[in-house]
Amino acid sequence: MADVLTEKQRHYNMSRIRSKNTKPEEVVRKYLFSKGFRYRKNDARYPGKPDIVLSKYKTVIFIHGCFWHQHPGCKAARIPDTNSEFWKSKFEKNIDVKEKRELEEAGWKAIVLWECEISTKKKREIRLPALEDEIKSQL
Ligand SMILES: [Zn+2]
């Protein structure tokens, strides 16, 4: 049992270390960059420290890992049966109502993109152009 927990904690620590530049974020950034968008990354001056800040469009994007942010109804968000209380205490806060309202009151649009929405090439081919349209609609 002790070994299992250690293994999980190690894995958790690894995920935390990588969380600054996780792959889904890079996928979205690369796509937007290739379409001519320019942005800032992980800007702490905005509520919730968005992954992508598009000042020109007054839009911020949060890219959430389904497990760490507990995507509602998503099978990737399933909590392991063992040590479920341990896991529940570790989940990162979703962009909450307060942060979203703060952004909206300042005239910004906040888009939340879930990891599972862009997990395959086929899904990306649908979701990323839709994201692009959503951003452009802000101008
Ligand atoms: Zn999901």
Image (cartoon, grey):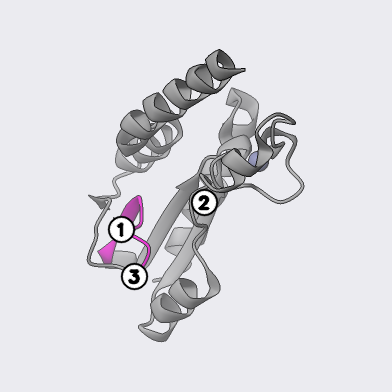
Residue behind mark 2: 131
Tag 1 or tag 2, which sits nearer the N-term? 1
The x and y percentages for residue 69 are 55, 48
Count residues near mark 3 (Cα–Cα under 10 Å), then give few for <14, some for 14-19, many for 20+: some
Instruction: Give the residue at x 54% y 13%.
Output: 3
Distance between mark 3 and mark 1 Cα atoms = 8 Å
User: In the visual, does 26 lie left or right of 129?
Assistant: left
Q: Quadrant of ligand 1?
A: top right
132 shown above or below 14: below
- Magenta includes 96? no
The x and y percentages for residue 125 are 58, 33
Query: Pointers 2 and 1 in contact (CB under 8 A)?
Result: no
User: In the visual, does 78 lie left or right of 105?
Assistant: right
Quadrant of residue 19 within the rendered picture: top left
Distance between mark 2 and mark 3 Cα atoms = 14 Å
Query: Toward the viewer: 64 or 108?
Result: 64
47 shown above or below 54: below
Q: Amino acid at mark 1?
A: Val
The x and y percentages for residue 127 are 59, 42
Residue furthest front as drawn:
2
Q: Amino acid at mark 3?
A: Lys
- Residues rendered magenta in the picture: 47-55
Which labelled disc corresponds to residue 53?
1
Instruction: Give the residue at x 48% y 50%.
Output: 92
Eye-nearest disc, 2 or 1: 1
Residue behind mark 3: 58
Label 2 secondary element: helix
Residue furthest bottom as drawn:
105
| Quadrant in the picture for the C terminus | bottom left
Count residues near mark 1 (Cα–Cα under 10 Å), then give few for <14, some for 14-19, many for 20+: many
